[in-house]
Image (cartoon, rainbow, N blue to C red):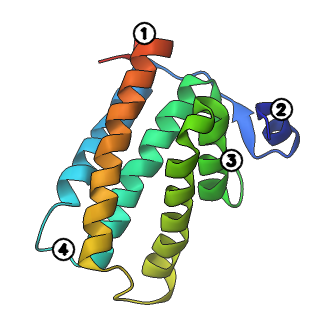
Amino acid sequence: MTWQDLLNAQRVRVHNTSLQEIHDLRTVVERDLRDAKLDALSDDRRFATAYNAVLQLTKIVIACQGYRVTGLGHHQTTFQALEIAMGSSVHALSSYFERCRRQRNQVDYDMANVATEAEAKLLVQKAQEFRQLVERWIRKNYSAYAV
């Protein structure tokens, strides 16, 4: 799959990001990573909040590449676009996040007590690692958006 394939399918559109947009998304990521560590939240809510941090990080990557995901199934498209943007080196991580996407759908729409404490903690850990990876990628490829 390529950016052109996603454009042709109307699953992404061309988008000019800004330093402010990237900053705002980073702020959401920080909030969500902080909140996902709160013991007072249920495992489901911590899982869903960590998932959102990952989603926002992926949106940052896509925005740096000059696109925005649109339409139905945008979470799924977001993780497909991650590999287009960052390459096959993120395949395992992208696959893991795709599995988390399906689980998060159950948490948010279908039932309670879906995520375990271990699953929530693992997703928080992976989200933190992914944030570091994204920031290194930005410094290397899009230094105007680096922190």
Tell me residue 142's x, y (percent).
48, 14
Tell me residue 99's x, y (percent).
54, 66
Distance, label 2 to label 3, CA atoms, is 14 Å
Q: Quadrant of the C terminus?
A: top left
Does residue 18 sit above or below 38 in this rendering?
Answer: above
Comes first in the chain, label 2 or label 3: 2
SS of the residue at dot 2?
A: helix
User: In the drawing, what numbered circle is on residue 103?
Assistant: none
Q: Please tell me which residue is depicted at 41% across the width and 31% down the height of the picture.
A: 134
Distance, label 3 to label 4, CA atoms, is 31 Å
SS of the residue at dot 3?
A: loop
Q: Are marks 4 and 2 in contact (CB under 8 Å)?
A: no
Comes first in the chain, label 3 or label 4: 4
Comes first in the chain, label 4 or label 1: 4
Per the image, the residue denoted by label 4 is 41
Q: Please tell me which residue is depicted at 46% across the width and 71% down the height of the picture.
A: 104
* Dot 4 amino acid type: Leu
Comes first in the chain, label 4 or label 2: 2
Per the image, the residue denoted by label 2 is 4
